[in-house]
Amino acid sequence: MSATAHSVEQPTTESKEDRLRAYLRRRAADGEIYFKSKFISDDVGLTPKEIGALMVKLRDAPGDLTIEKWSYTSATTWRVSLA
């Protein structure tokens, strides 16, 4: 069977950080969002711990997102808006 006979889906080369950033942009497009990592982990395919680490990295990186650590009650709540 030739490689051209079937369309094989290639794994995405999008990094975890890029995937999370794109998700946050989509969700914040209509205004600010508040969330806990554990509630979006299935949506982005990352663990809450991975999301938390990436949120700190994204918060400190230049870009079009404004990210704030909003509160902590059993888990960090993040506030995200478009800059």
Image (spheres, grey):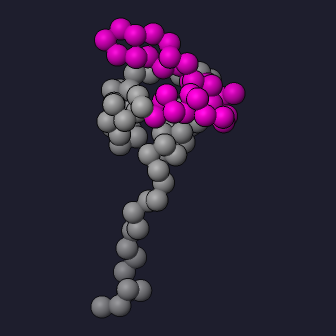
Where's the C terminus, which quadrant? top right
Would you place residue 17 above or below residue 61 in this image? Answer: below
Would you place residue 65 above or below residue 13 in this image? Answer: above
Confirm whether residue 32 shows in the render: yes
Residue 57 at x, y = what percent?
51, 33
Please, which residue is most extreme toward the bottom here? 1
Which stretch appears magenta?
A: 54-83
Residue 78 at x, y = what percent?
48, 20
Residue depicted at 46% across the width and 59% down the height: 13
Residue depicted at 42% across the width and 31% down the height: 53
Residue 58 part of the magenta segment? yes
Residue 59 at x, y = what percent?
56, 28
Confirm whether residue 29 shows in the render: no
Residue 19 part of the magenta segment? no
Quarter of the figure with residue 26:
top right
Where's the N terminus, which quadrant? bottom left
Residue depicted at 50% across the width and 12% down the height: 70
In terms of depth relative to the viewer, which is nearer, 58 or 26?
58
Q: Does 18 sit left or right of 65 as displayed?
A: left
Quarter of the figure with residue 66:
top right
Number of numbered discs on residues: 0
Residue depicted at 35% across the width and 40% down the height: 46
Would you place residue 50 above or below residue 36 in this image? Answer: below
Residue 25 at x, y = what percent?
58, 36
